[in-house]
């Protein structure tokens, strides 16, 4: 596709759906098979301290690298050591062959189609004190806001007019999160955003109760995003001080039982090992996540050196993110895997797509006072996080933008075969 920012994708746009289905059972994958309304949930993430301790990852010999890639492409489950080996390519040749395999896996399932998510940060108030987040409760230097329903609906309509595939309603874990009023108000917002735009809605409210998740599902939410950030309980305790590792994991199990698709994610560059990341891939597989995410840690600029003085260098965090995207694509060929604009802005989009991502997230409308998470203002006011900025990148890489209707037909395909 040789288009410009002002041109539409080569294929004509499809009409938006008249309504957003209320449960997963109403969503159908491309092959027409029913997405199960409920699937058996996994047990809590394995107990202990994450992946077993031991020597460095077992790396395949040079001549075995191609065999390992072919095994991954064949959908044969990989062991922890094999997954860690894929995350540790030896030099540029192996690295590039990993990315090529990830692109092939994406092409086999998704063709050249890439979807886009509009991002709406409802509130920057949060009761948690996560050490990686600029909005943590102990950081008093950040301005806080709560957007009104009218402001959210206005921004939602703007993003829908641009043509995004989904709207992500994100909020800090507000001190009012557990109140019935909070649940009711967020459910009303989900319902109204879906009705006003005709788009599917993702909610990212942090840790909420099973009852709240059922209410959000009944209101029309499609996805529940709740990131563990790591599946090592010891590292989790450091990242998410004072939070319950198992409670956060169980929330995602409850979400699936409530009929929601689940997005799970990890952070790179926060003191994790390669085996930690490999273990996370296996844990997310056990969860049955329909969307999986990796994101490089960006030290908040307001905090000077940041809280992780012993973390890998920023370049290492970024490299690990790209490798994780590729390995997740091989492990989850049917899944939605984001390339976030919240880390490096539009300049960082192409490498993430080149690693196998098939979703562009964190599109934020300008002039509405919305902030990002990792990079609060990066590329927002210059409209670098708009669909108009994304489309030329897709075109230059031979990729096309999926319509909302195409997204609806494909969103649940990551659950196929998990009955």
Image: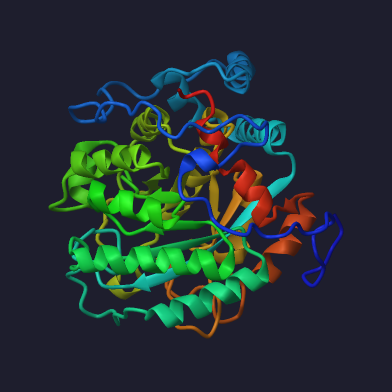
Please, is residue 322 above or below residue 7 in the view? above
Apparent side of residue 118 relative to residue 221 in the rendered image (left or right): right
Q: Is residue 65 visible?
A: yes
In the orientation shown, which residue stands out farthest toward the bottom?
367
| Image position, residue 185 (x, y; %) | 31, 69
Apparent side of residue 18 relative to residue 203 in the rendered image (left or right): right
Please, is residue 135 above or below residue 333 in the view? below
| Image position, residue 12 (x, y; %) | 82, 58
Residue 11, by quadrant, is bottom right
Locate the C terminus by quadrant: top left
Apparent side of residue 275 relative to residue 394 in the rendered image (left or right): left
In the orientation shown, which residue stands out farthest toward the left?
242
Q: Closest to the observer: 333 or 147?
A: 147
Q: Is residue 174 visible?
A: no
Q: Closest to the observer: 229 or 169?
A: 169
Q: Closest to the observer: 47 or 109?
A: 109
How many discs mark residues in the rendered view?
Answer: 0
Residue 281, by quadrant, is top left
| Image position, residue 37 (x, y; %) | 44, 35
What residue is rendered at 31% in x and 80% in y?
Answer: 145
What residue is rendered at 52% in x and 50% in y?
Answer: 21
| Image position, residue 70 (x, y; %) | 64, 18
Please, is residue 220 above or below residue 333 in the view? below
**By what rule are the colours in the image chosen?**
rainbow
Locate the N terminus by quadrant: bottom right
What residue is rendered at 61% in x and 69% in y?
Answer: 160
């Amino acid at each position: 596709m040789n288009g410009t920012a002002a041109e539409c994708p080569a294929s004509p746009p499809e009409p938006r759906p008249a309504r957003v289905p209320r449960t997963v059972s109403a969503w159908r994958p491309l092959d027409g098979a029913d997405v199960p309304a409920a699937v058996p949930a996994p047990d809590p993430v394995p107990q202990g301290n994450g992946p077993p301790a031991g020597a460095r990852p077992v790396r395949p010999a040079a001549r075995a690298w191609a065999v390992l890639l072919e095994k991954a492409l064949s959908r044969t489950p990989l062991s922890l050591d094999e997954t860690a080996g894929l995350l540790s390519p030896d030099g540029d040749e192996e690295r590039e062959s990993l990315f090529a395999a990830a692109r092939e896996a994406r092409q086999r399932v998704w063709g050249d189609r890439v979807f886009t998510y509009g991002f709406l940060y409802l509130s920057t108030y949060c009761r948690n004190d996560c050490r990686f987040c600029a909005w943590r409760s102990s950081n008093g230097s950040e301005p806080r806001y709560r957007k009104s329903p009218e402001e959210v609906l206005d921004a939602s309509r703007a993003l829908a007019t641009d043509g995004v595939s989904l709207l992500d309603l994100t909020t800090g874990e507000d001190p009012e999160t557990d109140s019935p009023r909070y649940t009711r108000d967020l459910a009303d917002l989900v319902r109204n955003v879906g009705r006003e735009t005709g788009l599917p809605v993702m909610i990212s409210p942090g840790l909420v109760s099973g009852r709240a998740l059922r209410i959000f599902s009944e209101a029309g939410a499609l996805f529940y995003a709740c990131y563990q950030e790591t599946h090592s309980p010891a590292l989790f305790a450091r990242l998410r001080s004072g939070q319950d590792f198992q409670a956060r994991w169980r929330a995602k199990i409850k979400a699936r039982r409530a009929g929601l698709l689940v997005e799970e994610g990890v952070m790179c560059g926060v003191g994790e090992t390669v085996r930690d990341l490999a273990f996370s891939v296996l844990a997310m597989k056990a969860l049955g996540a329909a969307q999986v995410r990796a994101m490089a840690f960006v030290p908040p600029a307001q905090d000077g050196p940041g809280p992780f003085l012993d973390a890998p260098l920023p370049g290492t965090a970024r490299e690990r993110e790209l490798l994780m995207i590729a390995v997740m694509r091989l492990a989850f060929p049917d899944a939605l895997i984001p390339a976030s604009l919240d880390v490096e802005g539009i300049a960082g989009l192409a490498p993430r797509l080149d690693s196998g991502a098939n979703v562009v997230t964190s599109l934020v409308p300008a002039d509405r006072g919305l902030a990002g998470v990792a990079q609060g203002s990066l590329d927002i006011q210059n409209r670098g996080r708009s669909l108009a900025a994304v489309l030329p990148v897709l075109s230059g890489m031979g990729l096309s933008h999926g319509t909302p209707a195409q997204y609806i037909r494909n969103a649940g395909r990551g659950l196929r075969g998990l009955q």
